[in-house]
Image (cartoon, rainbow, N blue to C red):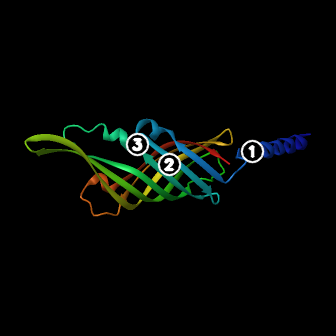
């Protein structure tokens, strides 16, 4: 009787000890809602899972520059990252088939920086102000870390933070740094 009970306990342990993994699909699409609400950035990401540890994807981000342009006051220069195109590769610290995991990411960035300045001019003894715009295209590299969780088997929560550096000769710090910050919601298909 004891042997039967021991076999039954071992069998049920093996039966219920399986890891709670996803019915795994290889494609993710995500929208960065946090940046849209706070920074008026609109980001969309596509990610393809390569294997249990690696994935690759592209992220496109566009900023609402009209919002920044209306905030010009007192001859303050506003430097705005207008858009970004970021291809990336991610390494998961645990298996991607888990419901949640931390990851490290290396990304490239092709981006555009707009500089708005409010300048005062005097012509024919009349003073006037004019908003001027300068556009600079950049290429850069960076790294970020993040956390990703799958819930209800197809929905995704993804949080990340990281920075990169543009490959430009500008002395301006805002033109040199590439932020990679986001709280994304998405769908696994």
Residue with the mark numbered 1: 17
Gap in angstroms between the C-alphas marked 3 and 1: 50 Å
Q: Is residue 175 left or right of residue 34?
A: left
Q: In terms of image quadrants, where is residue 149?
A: top right
User: SS of the residue at dot 2?
Assistant: strand
Q: Residue at x 26, y 60 (%)?
A: 170
The spot of residue 152 in percent (x, y) is 68, 38
The spot of residue 153 in percent (x, y) is 69, 42
Please identify, in this view, whether the residue under mark 3 or under mark 2 is nearer the observer.
Answer: 3
What quarter of the picture does the N terminus occupy?
Answer: top right
Residue with the mark numbered 2: 146
The spot of residue 32 in percent (x, y) is 50, 43
Q: Is residue 3 left or right of residue 142?
A: right
Q: Which mark is residue 55?
A: none
185 up-or-down from 47: above or below? above
* Circles 3 and 2 in contact, beta carbons < 8 Å: no
User: SS of the residue at dot 3?
Assistant: loop
Q: Residue at x 86, y 45 (%)?
A: 7
| Disc 1 crowd, CA 10 A, few/some/many (<14, 14-19, 20+) | few
The spot of residue 185 in percent (x, y) is 56, 41
Gap in angstroms between the C-alphas marked 3 and 2: 25 Å
Q: Is residue 2 left or right of residue 107?
A: right
Gap in angstroms between the C-alphas marked 2 and 1: 28 Å
Q: Residue at x 75, y 44 (%)?
A: 17
| Disc 2 crowd, CA 10 A, few/some/many (<14, 14-19, 20+) | some
* Circles 3 and 1 in contact, beta carbons < 8 Å: no
Q: Residue at x 67, y 43 (%)?
A: 154
Q: Which mark is residue 64?
A: 3
Q: Is residue 25 left or right of residue 149?
A: right
């Amino acid at each position: 009787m004891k042997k039967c009970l021991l076999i039954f306990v071992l069998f049920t342990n093996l039966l219920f000890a399986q890891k709670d993994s996803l019915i795994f699909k290889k494609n993710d699409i995500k929208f960065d809602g946090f940046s849209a609400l706070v920074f008026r950035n609109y980001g969309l990401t596509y990610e393809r899972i390569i294997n249990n540890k690696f994935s690759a994807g592209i992220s496109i981000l566009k900023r609402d520059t009209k919002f920044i342009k209306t905030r010009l006051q007192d001859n303050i220069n506003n430097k705005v990252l207008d858009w970004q195109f970021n291809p990336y590769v991610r390494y998961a610290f645990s298996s991607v088939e888990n419901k949640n995991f931390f990851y490290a990411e290396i990304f490239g960035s092709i981006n555009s920086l707009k500089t708005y300045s409010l300048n005062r001019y005097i012509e024919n003894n009349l003073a006037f102000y004019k908003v001027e715009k300068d556009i600079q295209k950049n290429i850069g590299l960076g790294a970020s870390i993040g956390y990703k969780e799958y819930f209800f088997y197809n929905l995704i929560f993804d949080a990340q933070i990281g920075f990169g550096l543009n490959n430009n000769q500008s002395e301006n710090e805002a033109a040199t740094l590439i932020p990679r910050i986001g709280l994304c919601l998405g769908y696994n298909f």
